[in-house]
Image (cartoon, rainbow, N blue to C red):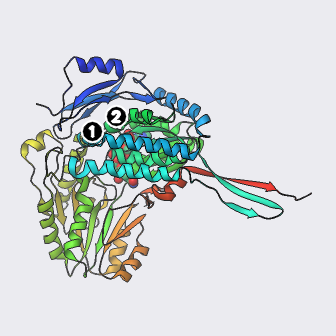
């Protein structure tokens, strides 16, 4: 019996034809109507070529539903709608934009159980541990930016008897946004909320694997009062729909989150009309653990920093460099923590700490890296238990700990994006800093020590958009998030993130200068 089934084999398809939606029963008992189409101008439509993408339950491999796969033509339609909407939306006052965001927050809050269950079903996130938290975290981001919407000011810079000059922070206009599958609701919140707060209109492409929560929420954007064309959302293949959005000559800004490889493509496509661009890309984030570290806490933070969200975390602590004086104890304790905290299973079961990976492709990729680690001679110190049947049907991966990893090994250099950690030893802290920096990535890094002076000194040396001291991977929506090096360009979240959704105009006024 699959977890999800249509309410009657025939009613589902008929509904889908008429309303671009299908009735779904969730394992927690909720029933809801899942939209499956393309959301443009507050209306649903099929893809122009009627193409669809299957969405699977990652725990069972069963197909849940087919959603429309937008074509380049559909993307063009969305951009036209957005451009038209921008003509009047640009004059909507900030307090009104804030009100609409608040309406949306209230509607999502009322539907939180359903949205969290959809997110769990779609992505494999444990419902109680992760999915609910993601929705609450995303709502905090909407709330934060709703607060900014009436505070997008410029500055008065020259104010003399002869001249007044000031700046305006104006929206870019049509913002193309492309998100990945690891945090569908959160990643959308990080992009939609600041774009709207700053007065832009949005055309968003969802990830192929995880479109359900955001498609469900489209109707709530409409109900919240957003005018047609202000928020347009669809699913589509990256190479078709995503690339059209990135290259589209009438899109003013592109904001992308995903792999560094795709980020490079997006940057080239965005060059067609010199779009404003922000890229949030991959990482291979190190933690340096000094000899005086609190071992109990260091191992717990290091563990949570990678094993949360099935290891599908862009700034996951995938490399741990540990001082030789505590190395053996650290490895033993880390394994103990993994044993205690990595109950693997279906995301809807109680007390599950690790669900399946998002897709078969992702599962195979991560299992491939684990094999590579063994082949290269890293010491496999722990591989968690996953029932054979679950492994066969669902997309599970055992939590895996490698020790004695050399820096030149593939598992130490490439982003695995799964519950796999590479632990290595160091004797000299300068050497550890250089090794931590020896990566094309620079998204996050952590330092663990009781010596805060040393922690600050090391933080300055780390080539990374974020540094966590005596913690890992716990950002804050008020703080900027983004990467150094090939982990990205620009920042999301906080005031810095808002800035990337405005452009600055300088206005000069002659107050009496005569020629
Ligand atoms: P991905 O690059 O394969 O896909 C991301 C999005 O880009 C998807 O919507 C996809 O359809 C689209 N896409 C793919 N090819 C495209 C193309 N040619 N043109 C336009 N769009 C295209 O990444 P993924 O596998 O979905 O996500 C995992 C990656 O995302 C990891 O590398 C992870 O580190 C990164 N990530 C980064 C952050 C961050 O904030 N830095 C956050 C989450 C995930």
In percent of width and height, residue 193 lies at 46, 47
Residue topped by disc 1? 114
In percent of width and height, residue 279 lies at 46, 51
Above/below status of 69 relative to 194: above
For the C terminus, the image quarter is: bottom right
For the N terminus, the image quarter is: top left
Q: Secondary structure at mark 2?
A: helix
Residue visible at 32% across and 47% down? 135
Residue visible at 76% across and 63% down? 159
Instruction: Please say whether residue 431 is visible from this viewpoint.
Output: yes
In the image, 273 versus 157, the foreground residue is 157
Above/below status of 19 relative to 337: above
Q: Secondary structure at mark 1?
A: helix
Q: Earlier in the sequence, mark 1 or mark 2?
A: 1
Q: Tell whether label 2 touches label 1 (CB within 8 Å).
A: yes
Q: CA distance from mark 1 to mark 2?
A: 10 Å
Side of 286 relative to 460 (left or right):
left
Residue topped by disc 2? 216
In percent of width and height, residue 489 lies at 48, 55
Which quadrant of the view contains residue 27?
Answer: top left
Residue visible at 24% across and 62% down? 304
* Crowd around label 1: few <14 · some 14–19 · many ≥20 (10 Å): many
Foreground mark, 1 or 2, reads: 1
């Amino acid at each position: 019996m699959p977890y999800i089934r249509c309410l009657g084999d025939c009613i589902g398809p008929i509904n889908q034809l008429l309303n671009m939606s299908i009735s779904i029963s969730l394992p927690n008992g909720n029933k809801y109507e899942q939209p499956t189409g393309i959301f443009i101008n507050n209306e649903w439509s099929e893809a122009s070529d009627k193409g669809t993408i299957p969405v699977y339950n990652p725990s069972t491999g069963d197909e849940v539903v087919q959603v429309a796969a937008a074509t380049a033509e559909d993307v063009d339609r969305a951009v036209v709608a957005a451009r038209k909407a921008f003509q009047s939306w640009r004059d909507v006052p900030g307090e009104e934009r804030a009100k609409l965001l608040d309406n949306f927050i209230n509607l999502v809050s009322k539907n939180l159980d359903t949205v969290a269950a959809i997110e769990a079903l779609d992505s494999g996130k444990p419902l109680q541990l992760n999915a609910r938290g993601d929705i609450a975290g995303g709502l905090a981001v909407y709330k934060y930016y709703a607060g900014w919407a009436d505070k997008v000011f410029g500055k008065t810079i020259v104010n003399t008897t002869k001249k007044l000059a000031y700046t305006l922070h104006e929206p870019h206009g049509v913002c193309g946004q492309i998100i990945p599958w690891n945090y569908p609701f959160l990643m959308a919140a990080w992009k939609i909320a600041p774009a709207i707060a700053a007065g832009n209109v949005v055309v968003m492409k969802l990830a192929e694997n995880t479109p359900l929560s955001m498609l469900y929420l489209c109707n709530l954007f409409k109900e919240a009062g957003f005018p047609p064309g202000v928020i347009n959302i669809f699913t589509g293949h990256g190479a078709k729909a995503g690339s059209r959005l990135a290259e589209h000559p009438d899109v003013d800004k592109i904001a992308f989150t995903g792999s560094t490889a795709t980020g490079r493509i997006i940057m080239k496509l965005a060059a067609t009309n010199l779009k404003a661009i922000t890229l949030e890309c991959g990482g291979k984030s190190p933690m340096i653990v000094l000899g005086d570290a609190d071992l109990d806490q260091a191992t717990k933070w290091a563990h949570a920093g990678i094993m949360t969200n099935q290891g599908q975390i862009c700034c996951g602590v995938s490399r741990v460099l540990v001082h030789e004086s505590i190395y053996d104890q650290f490895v033993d304790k880390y394994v103990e923590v993994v044993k205690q905290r990595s109950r693997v299973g279906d995301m809807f079961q109680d007390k599950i700490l690790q669900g399946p990976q998002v897709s078969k492709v992702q599962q195979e990729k991560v299992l491939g890296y684990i094999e590579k680690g063994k082949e290269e001679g890293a010491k496999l110190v722990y591989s968690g238990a996953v029932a054979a049947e679950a492994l066969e049907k669902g997309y599970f991966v055992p939590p895996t700990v490698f020790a004695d990893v050399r820096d030149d090994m593939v598992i130490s250099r490439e982003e695995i994006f799964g519950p796999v950690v590479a632990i290595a030893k160091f004797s000299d802290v300068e050497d550890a800093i250089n090794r931590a920096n020896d990566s094309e990535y620079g998204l996050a890094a952590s330092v663990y020590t009781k010596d805060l002076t040393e922690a600050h000194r090391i933080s300055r040396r780390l080539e990374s958009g974020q540094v966590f001291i005596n913690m890992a991977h716990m950002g804050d929506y008020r703080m900027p998030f983004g990467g150094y090096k090939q982990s990205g360009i620009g920042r999301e979240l906080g005031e810095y993130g808002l800035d990337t959704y405005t452009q600055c105009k300088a206005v000069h006024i002659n107050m009496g200068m005569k020629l």
